[in-house]
Every structure is written in C-alpha cells, then in structure tokens.
Amino acid sequence: MKSAVTGATDNMLGQPQHVKPSYCTVCKTILDGTSCVDDEAKPCPGDITICLYCGNVMAYDDALLLRNLTDDEKNMVAEDKTIQKLLHKIHTNPFFAQNNRH
C-alpha cells in the first residue's frame, strides 16, 4: 500500500496527478488531484490520501473514489511516521488554518 496525499504540501511529494473527482467524506470538497509520497505513480485501490481542506484521512476504493478508512487502516495510519509528518504539516499550514476557521 502506497501513501498518497491530495495536493502538494512540501518537497516530500511527487508531481500532482489528476484523478477521478470524488468528495471528501468529511468536508464534501470535490477532490480531483493527488501527489504520491513515494514516487510518481497514480493511486491504486487501498492507497491512503489526506484532504488538504479539512485534514481528513481516507482511502481509495476499487473505483478510485474516496472512502472512509477501515479500522485496520486507521491503526496503520496512526503508526505511519510519513503520514503523521504530513498531517502535522497540513494542520500547521496557513492555508489549512484559513480554510478551517469556525
């Protein structure tokens, strides 16, 4: 399973890729792009992604649409240092803070 992140947050990510539009399962933003952490590959079913608008962590389903994580995936994400580092960068990014005012 590769880690993929919607949008680019820093130089850890590859080139942005266009993907089939899909809604974030939390903020309902339409997401149609991703950047892979490890390489320039496009996402595959089961790959993890993070919404840059709300910070929600999701996975791609068999049709490459976004879905909520399974319990096993949630545990994997909690232990994955790369994903946790990206979540920290997203949550401390001024763009994220500006878009998540309550």
Image (tube, rainbow, N blue to C red):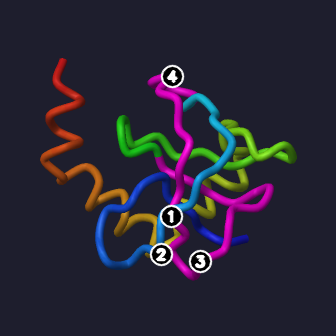
Quadrant in the rendering for residue 44: bottom right
Query: Is there CB contact under 8 Å for labels 2 and 1?
Result: yes
Residue denoted by label 4: 28
Q: Secondary structure at mark 1?
A: strand
Q: CA distance from mark 4 to mark 3?
A: 26 Å
Callout 3 secondary element: loop
Q: Residue at x 13, y 47 (%)?
A: 94
| Residue wearing tag 2 | 14
Residue type at mark 1? Answer: Ser
Q: Position of residue 97 (x, y in %)?
A: 17, 38
Label 4: few (<14), some or many (≥20) within 10 Å?
few
- Disc 2/disc 4 C-alpha distance (Å): 25 Å
Q: Image height check: is 96 above or below 89?
A: above
Residue receiving disc 3: 40
Q: Nearer the viewer, mark 1 or mark 4?
A: 1
Query: Residue at image x 86%, y 47%?
Result: 62
Pointers 1 and 4 in contact (C-beta within 8 Å): no
User: For mark 1, what is the residue?
Assistant: 35
The numbered mark, 1 or 4, whose residue comes first in the sequence reads: 4
Q: Is residue 45 left or right of residue 76?
A: right
Q: Nearer the viewer, mark 4 or mark 3?
A: 3
**Mark 4 vs 3, N-terminal side:** 4
Please count the marks in the image.
Answer: 4
Comes first in the chain, label 2 or label 1: 2
In the rendered structure, the answer to whether residue 9 lies left or right of residue 102 reads right
